[in-house]
Amino acid sequence: MISLGIEGTAHSIGIGIIQDVKGKCNVLSNNIKTYSPGKGGIHPREAANHHATYIADLISESVKKTQIDFSDIDLVSFSQGPGLGPCLRTAATAARALALALDKPIMGVNHCVAHLEIGRGTINGCKDPVLLYVSGANTQVIAFAEGKYRVFGETLDVGIGNCLDKFGRFMGMEFPCGPKIEELAKKGQKYLKLPYSIKGMDIAFSGLLTSAEQYVRKGEKLEDTCFSIQETTFAALTEVTERAIAHTEKNEVLLGGGVASNKRLRDMVKTMAQERYASFFVPSQDLCIDNGAMIAWLGFLMYNSGIRMSIEESVIDQRFRTDMVDVSWRE
Ligand code: ATP
Ligand code: FE2
């Protein structure tokens, strides 16, 4: 089966085309175009306009690149939520138009679940992981339990990526700030004490953000501040992930989301996994960030398990929670 997936939850519009091969995901193409606000944060309407401008050409290019015909597409999948309303609506509208034009079924999927399933679908040995999903807006520790993907821990305020971007913006850096902070952190030598706030299994970042800004105002080096932000936030993320592993008794850890590119975070989580004799997995970069291939793959899994969706049911859900999905495609 060939599935085309449209991702449009936030600042990226992605078109992915996948084919299932013996239960695994074969990515035929995966094209992503990202809206950059230049200065300031992401403006939902502007991001949606960006997506609307490029989506038709991106679909055509992707089909051409894959060397298939439109008639070869068996299913049109799209990101139904969670995300920014205007962006979600743009992707959903394109998906409906394409499904109707091709006379093919449509499938709306949960974006967070897609981040987990693409790891299982593309990485050998990744069967039942605890996912540490770290992106701009989202920060969640997710694992399968009793028919659903449960959120074992999450941020109580901003996502880790947004936390890094907010600090970066305060320092005058351009979006995305995560990679720039990572570079500066490599030169940091002094650890500055920052609030480490874990509440139960959840994490909060806003207090840390305020403290970090104060350090810079007081004249502490930017390199040391970036180093301390990474050490503190990543340690908290690793701790919550470790607790989820202990609780669920799973022995695989998967990273996902844009912040998973960070080498220091990878090292910390990998060390923790090794100490627990658990396997550690990270999908390739283009499957870690928001992308259409993961949407296409989850759409296929759902369709293949017998789930069907009418056009009327394809309404977006900005607050589509991970644990609202009935995971009928897993035992
Ligand atoms: P979502 O809609 O799932 O929340 P998103 O729109 O934020 O995702 P992603 O591409 O998953 O998009 O992640 C982008 C985030 O990743 C940005 O906040 C960016 O600063 C951060 N990021 C990217 N590379 C790095 C890095 N090397 N270190 C830390 N953060 C990074
Ligand atoms: Fe994402």
Image (cartoon, helix red, strand yellow):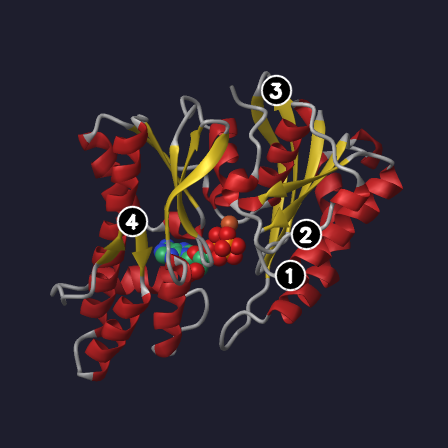
Asked if the residues shown at circle 4 and circle 2 are in contact, with their CB atoms under 8 angstroms apart, the answer is no
Q: Residue furthest bottom?
A: 218
Q: In this view, does 282 lie to the left or right of 221?
A: right
Mark 3 and mark 4: span between their CA atoms? Answer: 34 Å
Residue under numbered circle 3: 21
Image point (31%, 60%), residue name: 204
Query: Within 10 angstroms of label 4, few (less than 14), some, or many (20 or more) residues?
Result: many
**Front residue of 297 and 316:** 316
Residue under numbered circle 2: 316
The answer to whether 56 is drawn above or below residue 284 in the figure is: below
Q: Would you say the beta carbon of the disc 1 residue lies within 8 angstroms of ligand 1? A: no
Q: Earlier in the sequence, mark 3 or mark 2?
A: 3
Asked if the residues shown at circle 1 and circle 3 are in contact, with their CB atoms under 8 angstroms apart, the answer is no
The answer to whether 52 is drawn above or below residue 65 in the figure is: below
Residue 237 image label:
4
* Quadrant housing the N terminus: top right
Q: Earlier in the sequence, mark 4 or mark 2?
A: 4
Q: The residue under label 2 is which amino acid type? A: Ile
